[in-house]
Every structure is written in structure tokens, then in C-alpha cells.
Image (cartoon, rainbow, N blue to C red):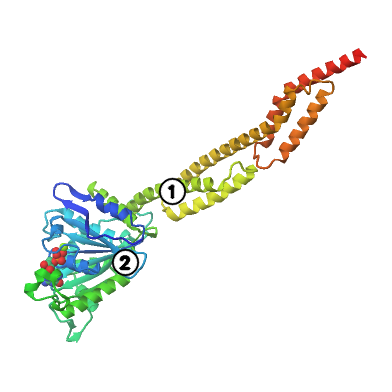
Amino acid sequence: SDIHMPEPVCLIENTQTKGLVVRQEALQVLSEITQPVVVVAITGLYRTGKSYLMNRLAGERKGFSLGSGVQSHTKGIWMWCVPHPCQPGHTLVLLDTEGLGDVEKGDSKNDAWIFVLAVLLSSTLIYNSKGTIDQQAMDQLHYAMKLAGHVKLKAAPKASEDEPEDSEKIVLFLPTFIWAVRDFTLQLELDGEEISEDKYLENALKLKAGSSPETQRYNQPRECIHQFFPHRKCFVFDQPARKGDLVRLEELEDDEIDPDFQQQVEKFCSHVWETSPLKTIPGGHIITGNLLGKLAATYVETIRSGAVPCLESAVLALAKIENAAAVKEAVALYQHLMEQRAKLPTETAEELLELHAQCERETLDLFTARAFEDGISQFREDLMRQVEAIKVKFRKDNEQASRDECQAALKKLFQGMKERISGGVYIASGGYQLFKEDQQALVEKYQQLPGKGVMADAVLQEFLQSTDLLAKFILKIDHFLTWKEKEMK
Ligand SMILES: Nc1nc2c(ncn2[C@@H]2O[C@H](COP(=O)(O)OP(=O)(O)O)[C@@H](O)[C@H]2O)c(=O)[nH]1
Ligand SMILES: [Mg+2]
């Protein structure tokens, strides 16, 4: 069912004293989201209108707090999950970053890690800047990306030279990139000709020829952006209102907001809603809200431990958690199916085995659908071991049920003979013959009874053995009485 989250919560807190911390309340919210997620994150300097734009992406005017609201006092990543406006059955997760000052001069390296986390967790990344796409904005982004550049795909070194560089493959899992330019002050023109926003961005990203230090300094951030974000879009926005109204932007009526800005926001939102991809990770798994939470926790743990986040390790860690959960779920399913379908005692042992095979198949299907490929065989073995143990238990229960059934049946059938024994009916010449006939009749009746199960023969043999002594006794008396009769004649 669709998520209802009245307001954003802090997902990852960034404090001076405790460093990066994942908030449990946020993980709780995510753990309940079983839908696939589209994750849109925004980053950039503070007070550039990021939170306002994210609220618009949520389809709201208020939510993430603007300016100096509560949110801005808690640095880190804030999260708001809303039903996806265009894709039913999907959840749109909006991540707003808070407190990114001038990263390069920032006193905390964690500020840059917040940027890295936004990159790693999102499927669309919005970089927000004010005015124009200038060198300063470019350098800001580059500095954070240099850190992101340390992020690895694989923990182990490359197996061979032919294997593509990490960075080439890692790009497949990096978000699509949107540059949002706010309070855009220029004309979209190049050499006197009108150009598109995307063209404007590409032009700003164009490399200069040559190798002078200045050229290198100019090219470096651009090369970096080219490499990491091959899918790029640009949107420019006018100033949304008159200067004095900007502080109370949330409160403004539609007709007080610049119509061009309105149009630009609508165009931007439509684009993000319609084109932002689902979040995926190596191995092609679809990320649900639940998995996104675990991914965030894994990355933050890695960074806290002083290591550099590694996509493959994160996926492995995730796989471990998920596969263990998949085993547990599958075992419960097997138990449930067997309990529901097995009517003990079954007529034959094969019947139970067939039922087992059928339930095992459904169990494995569930496991395979849920589990991650990474390290799956070990978990599958564990699952099979547990299923086998339950199967053994069912076999034993089946035997016991059959035993109970057969013993009860024999007790009932034996009732008549028991009365004849107490009545001394068999204590006679020819008594043994009578006893044997009664016993034969009992056996025949027993064998016709349905639903005795797998222990029918064994229990009958046990029964016959238990009457063996009695039979011998009756035979002896019979002989004696017959001999006595002859004697009397
Ligand atoms: N000039 C200008 N101000 C904006 C824009 N969008 C929002 N604001 C105002 O700028 C202030 C900071 O906005 P906010 O969204 O909190 O920026 P953030 O710090 O980047 O999240 C608030 O007073 C907003 O009303 C915009 O496009 N241009
Ligand atoms: Mg903000």
C-alpha cells in the first residue's frame, strides 16, 4: 500500500561530536516500504532554494523546511517518501541535503561524505546552484566528486588487465544528473543564437584545448563530470518572486509567483517524475524502501569505520542480510505449507514424500525470487538443511499418527475376542481353532479399515506377537482337554 508520511524526517545526521549517524526512526519508515523506489537527491550550497524545489517534487508547498527552519539546524540528509506521482506501486524518495557549506573550505570532511552518500543512495542527483554555471559552482562539485572518486565498485583488485576500470563500471550505478540553475540571470544564447538549457550546460562543460596549468585546472572538473555523469540534463529557473517576497515563498498565492518560474518548475517536475529511473545496485536487484534503508546503514557504517564505501561490499553486506531473511521466510513457508496440506497419517510414505517435494519446490521458488545471487549457495544449503530437518519431523509425526490410529483400531476390533477370553470361550477342546478363526477375522477386518497409514503392518505384527503367548496357552489347554476327553471315553 502507498506510503503516507506527513513530513520529512532526518535519515543521516552529521554532527560535530558523533559524526555520521543513521536515524532509527527513518530506517523504521523505510523498512515498511516494500515498493520499489525512485530516489531523487539534491545537493549544492546552502540557501540556494534546494528544499523549496524538493517540496515541489513532493507535490507540496511545504515539507522540507526552508531557510532557517528546524531542518537546517540538523545537518545531514533529510528524507521524505511519497507515493510516486506517475508510477503506481512505486515510492518516490526525496533526499534533501542540509548544511553543505563551501565544501572545499568546510571544516568537516563529513560534509563531503554527505555528498557521496547522496550520490550512492540516489537514482537521480540534482545539483543546485545559483546564478550561472560558473567556475565556482564547477569547483564545488568537483571537490565533492574527487571524494566520490574514491568510492570503489569492487573490494578486490582487478582480476585482469582486460577488465574495465572500476570507474567505468561504477558509472552504471551512479545516478542520472540534473543541474538546476536558480535565479538564472543570463540569456540562453550562444553566438547570438538561442540555445537549449542542455546545450548551455554542455557548452559550460566543454573542454579547452591545450595543457597549460590554467587549462588543466579548467578541464579537470569538467572531465570528472563527463566521466561520472554521462546522462546530464540542465534546467534553468527565473527568480520566483519579487525580492521582498522571497523569504515568504511558501506562503505566496500562485498568482504572486512569477509565471515563468511556475512553468519552469512544472516542466522540471514532469521531467523528474517521468524519467527518473528506479534505484538499482550491481546484480540488478530492484531496491525497495526496505533495502534502501539497509544500504544507507551499510554505507554509513563503512564511512564511520574509516573505510571508503565500496559498492560491491555494500551489496555483499546487503545480500547477507537479505539471504538470511529469505532463508527464514522460506523455512516458515515450508512449515506452513506442510502443516496445511499434510493430513496425517498419510496412506503411504510416498504420498508424504510427494507432498514434501511439492512444498519444497514452492519454498525454493520463494527463496530464489527473494535472495541475492551473491553467496546464495551457502544460504540455499542452509535452507535445504532446515527443510530436511522439518521433513524428518513430519515423517516421524506421520509414523506416530499412524501408530496411534492403528493401535486404536486394533483395540476396538479386539474388544469381542477380549470378552470371549474372559468368558472362557476358548478354554475348550477345539478352543484354539476358534481362537485362530476369530483372530483371522480380526486381521481381515483390520486390513479393510482405511486411513491406517504407514505403520499398519508393523503395528499388526506387534499386536499378533503380543497375543502369541495367549495363543500358545490356549493351544496347550486345547491339547490337554482333547486328550482328557479321549481318556474319558
Ligand atoms: N532567490 C531565490 N530564493 C529562493 C528560491 N527558492 C527558494 N528561495 C528562498 O530562499 C530561502 C532558502 O531556501 P531553501 O529552499 O531553504 O534553500 P536551501 O538551503 O538550499 O534548502 C528561502 O527563504 C526561500 O523562500 C529561488 O529560486 N530563488
Ligand atoms: Mg534546505
From the viewer's side, name the closer residue of 381 and 462: 462
Distance, label 2 to label 1, CA atoms, is 28 Å
- Tell me if I can see residue 207 in this picture: no
Q: Name the quadrant containing residue 487.
A: top right
From the viewer's side, name the closer residue of 112 and 237: 237
397 over 358 or under it: above or below: above
Q: Where is residue 12 in the image (x, y as percent from the top left)?
A: 22, 54
The crowd level at tag 2 (other Cα within 10 Å; few <14, some 14-19, many 20+) is many
Give the secondary structure at mark 1.
helix
For the point 81% across and 24% down, the residue is 432
Q: Name the quadrant containing residue 266.
A: bottom left
From the viewer's side, name the closer residue of 171 and 55: 55
Disc marking residue 329? 1
339 over 226 or under it: above or below: above
The crowd level at tag 1 (other Cα within 10 Å; few <14, some 14-19, many 20+) is some
* CB at disc 1 and ligand 2 closer than 8 Å: no
- Residue at the extreme left of the image, as rendered: 244
Q: Position of residue 234 (x, y in %)?
A: 23, 74
Give the secondary structure at mark 2.
loop
In the figure, is residue 309 to the left or right of 320?
left
- Tell me if I can see residue 319 in this picture: yes
Can you say which quadrant of the picture contains the C terminus? top right
For the point 60% across and 48% down, the residue is 354
Q: Where is residue 5 in the image (x, y as percent from the top left)?
A: 26, 60
For the point 9% across and 73% down, the residue is 245
Disc marking residue 84? 2
Quarter of the image where ligand 1 sits? bottom left
Amino acid, disc 2? His
Amino acid, disc 1? Glu
Total labels drawn:
2
- Residue at the extreme right of the image, as rendered: 489
